[in-house]
Image (tube, helix red, strand yellow):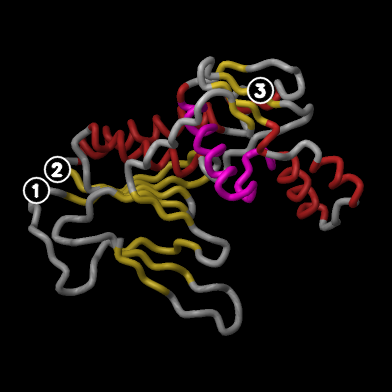
Amino acid sequence: MQRRGKPSKPPSPGQRRISSGASLTVLLLLLTASPGCRAPQHANLQRFEFEQAQMGLPFRIVLYAESQALASTAARAAFARVAALNQTFSDYEDDSELTKLSRSSGSGQAVKVSDELWRLLNVAETMSRRSGGAFDITVGPLVQVWRRARRQRELPAPEFLAEVKARVGWEKIVLDPRARTAKLLVPGMRLDFGSIAKGRALDEALRILRQHGITRALVTGSGDMAIGDPPPGRLGWRIELAPLDAPGAPPTQFLSL
């Protein structure tokens, strides 16, 4: 992405988050820590679990609260926040803000964006610059090509790939920090926040839970997770990582977060 004016620092994350890589998938959440790692007890807190489809994926909340009523109210509010963010970041929804921005590509128009979208555009620009373009939210056209190739079990023609690649590149976005606008320079561009929006949604879900007085919580969206304070009497959340589905793969691994 190109940029006018002084670059701003990306916002620091409010929570620690783990994203699954290609070789590891979060299989099971175990809410115990290793023996001997004990923290003060909180007898009034109960464990509750909630699950809901969000962003086309199963989102799960595990939290500790004093009552079912408080837990349910907080979980509903957290899921509602995720749903609202999906209306900003989705590249599937025709009426999402991100989709509308993609439609403006090549028009020469600088589009005013919301604070939420501006935040992630800034983070994406920073990560693209730092990674030399390895991180790139403009890969939407290529993602579509390879999804279709996988469904049809047929490789795309080299000349077609070359044409699609011409629409990809983080330098093809111009951000104006004074006007809070984004301009997509090349026709047919398609932004894809699949690598970053889910993490933002998880952070926001934890923030909403804290607003309801719940700090001991874990939120997952498929293979991504965000954690708050640990369960009562524990020093961390213990999770199990599934082994690779391949001969000679390393055994199951455990982490205490």
> Where is residue 151 shown, x and y percent of the image?
77, 52
Element type at marker 1?
Answer: loop
Q: Quadrant of residue 194?
A: top right
Q: Give left or right: position of 209 versus 18.
A: left
Per the model, the C-alpha gap separating discs 3 and 2 is 48 Å
> The residue under label 2 is which amino acid type?
Glu
Mark 3 highlights which residue? 183
The quadrant in which the C terminus is found is: bottom left
Q: Quadrant of residue 27?
A: bottom left
Q: Earlier in the sequence, mark 2 or mark 1?
A: 1
Per the model, the C-alpha gap separating discs 3 and 1 is 52 Å
Magenta residues (range): 116-139
> The residue under label 1 is which amino acid type?
Asn
User: Which residue is found at the position 27% from the left and 37% from the top?
Assistant: 209
> The residue under label 3 is which amino acid type?
Lys
Please say if the residues under marks 2 and 1 sit with CB atoms less than 8 Å apart.
yes
Mark 1 highlights which residue? 44
Q: Nearer the viewer, residue 114 or 208?
A: 114
